[in-house]
Image (tube, rainbow, N blue to C red):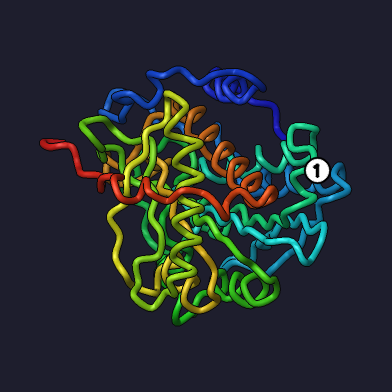
């Protein structure tokens, strides 16, 4: 992993240190991008740095296996990090960066990979298999696309939502036209017996619940074609996440407002493969043409920690079997987030 060169990067590392609490004000009321703060993407790992970290951890961790599942439009290898201790164990897939401008979940996933190689997760891998696709859209993440990059806010490299052809990968889970989507379905979804999936994204900055800006939002499959058993497992997965995040004092989750289209992974994968799925939308994007969608990098630390907490809590609940008895009543009261008026 490269050595951080900025104070912002160092602050992220400090927040992720073991036992370090994230300030309660981190979620609070900002900081948003308001034209006065520089949005600097140089503190985010490049595709090559993501790959280098994965290879470094693969060499260090006996339990980890790194697999290339395909290539992007521009020919970048797509990676899957695998922890399969027992094929009979339940399996969870963590998927990040279908949208190239939503990178902090990838940063969090890499931190989680590092945790899996330490004593912090001792015994967890005995009861659960973990699959991680840490960057499905590397071309968008690197701004290596075949459309204009006018109007993007970030200083440094541009990160785009779409892949190189201008396609939203999270609307391609039925037709499966793009090579990235084909790689995911052919070489992950159909190749492994997966029970759970969390699809990690970012949303805008102005969503709130109960008058307080959210740090993220969650949602289970809402297509009527998902089986009741799949939806129940998805709600249990979401309840584990809610309980882990909303109790921290710095996390505040809402219910995402999402549709029933099966072109979206949360819905389509639940139906096609019978997998319990959860969408987690973290607050604020790394780059965008819309100022209200971008969150200043002073918030990076808590969003990365929120990702690590989410992955750790769900892996533990599946490993020890407690997910099967998780109370899902939070979904009866969890309010849909709304957009803050006037912003």
The structure residue drawn at horizontal position 53% and vertical position 35%, both measured from the top left corner, is 304
Res 39 → quadrant: top left
Measuring from the top left, give residue 6's x and y in whole percent: 57, 21
Q: Say if 163 sits above or below 185 in the image.
A: above
View extreme (bottom): residue: 175
Measuring from the top left, give residue 44's x and y in whole percent: 55, 37
Q: Is residue 35 left or right of residue 49?
A: left
Q: Quadrant of the N terminus?
A: top right
The structure residue drawn at horizontal position 32% and vertical position 48%, both measured from the top left corner, is 255
The structure residue drawn at horizontal position 28% and vertical position 45%, both measured from the top left corner, is 333
Q: Is residue 225 visible?
A: yes
Q: Is residue 169 visible?
A: no
| Depth check, front residue: 81 or 52 | 81
Measuring from the top left, give residue 49's x and y in whole percent: 68, 43
User: Which SS class for mark 1?
Assistant: helix
Res 235 → quadrant: bottom left
Q: Say if 256 sits above or below 233 in the image.
A: above
Q: Say if 104 sits above or below 222 in the image.
A: above
Q: To which residue does mark 1 refer? A: 56
Q: Is residue 193 left or right of residue 185?
A: right
Measuring from the top left, give residue 92's x and y in whole percent: 63, 58
Res 74 → quadrant: bottom right
| Depth check, front residue: 302 or 291 | 302
């Amino acid at each position: 992993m490269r050595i951080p060169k900025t104070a912002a990067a160092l602050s992220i590392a400090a927040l992720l240190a073991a036992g370090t609490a994230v300030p309660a004000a981190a979620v609070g009321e900002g900081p948003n991008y308001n034209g006065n703060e520089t949005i600097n993407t140089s503190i985010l790992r490049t595709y090559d740095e993501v790959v280098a970290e994965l290879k470094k951890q693969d060499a260090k961790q006996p339990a980890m296996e790194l697999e290339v599942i395909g290539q992007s439009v521009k020919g970048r290898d797509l990676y899957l990090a695998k922890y399969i201790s027992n094929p009979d164990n339940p399996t969870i897939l963590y998927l990040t960066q279908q949208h190239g401008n939503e990178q902090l979940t990838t940063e969090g996933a890499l931190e989680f990979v590092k945790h899996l190689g330490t004593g912090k997760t001792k015994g967890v891998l005995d009861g659960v298999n973990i699959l991680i696709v840490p960057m499905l859209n590397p071309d968008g993440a690197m701004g290596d696309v075949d459309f204009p990059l006018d109007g993007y806010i970030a200083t440094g490299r541009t990160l785009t939502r779409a892949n190189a052809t201008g396609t939203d990968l999270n609307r391609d889970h039925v037709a499966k036209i793009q090579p990235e989507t084909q790689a995911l379905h052919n070489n992950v979804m159909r190749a492994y017996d997966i029970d759970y999936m969390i699809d990690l994204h970012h949303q805008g900055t102005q969503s709130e619940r109960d008058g307080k800006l959210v740090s993220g939002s969650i949602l289970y499959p809402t297509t009527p074609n998902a089986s009741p058993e799949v939806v129940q497992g998805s709600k249990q997965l979401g309840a584990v996440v809610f309980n882990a995040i909303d109790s921290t004092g710095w996390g505040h989750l809402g219910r995402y407002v999402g549709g029933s289209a099966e072109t979206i992974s949360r819905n389509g994968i639940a139906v096609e493969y019978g997998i319990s799925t959860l969408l987690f939308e973290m607050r604020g994007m790394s780059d965008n043409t819309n100022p209200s969608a971008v969150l200043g990098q002073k918030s990076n630390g808590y969003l990365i920690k929120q990702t690590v907490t989410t992955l750790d809590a769900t892996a533990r609940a599946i490993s020890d079997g407690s997910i099967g008895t998780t109370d899902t009543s939070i979904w009866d009261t969890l309010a849909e987030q709304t957009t803050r008026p006037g912003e």
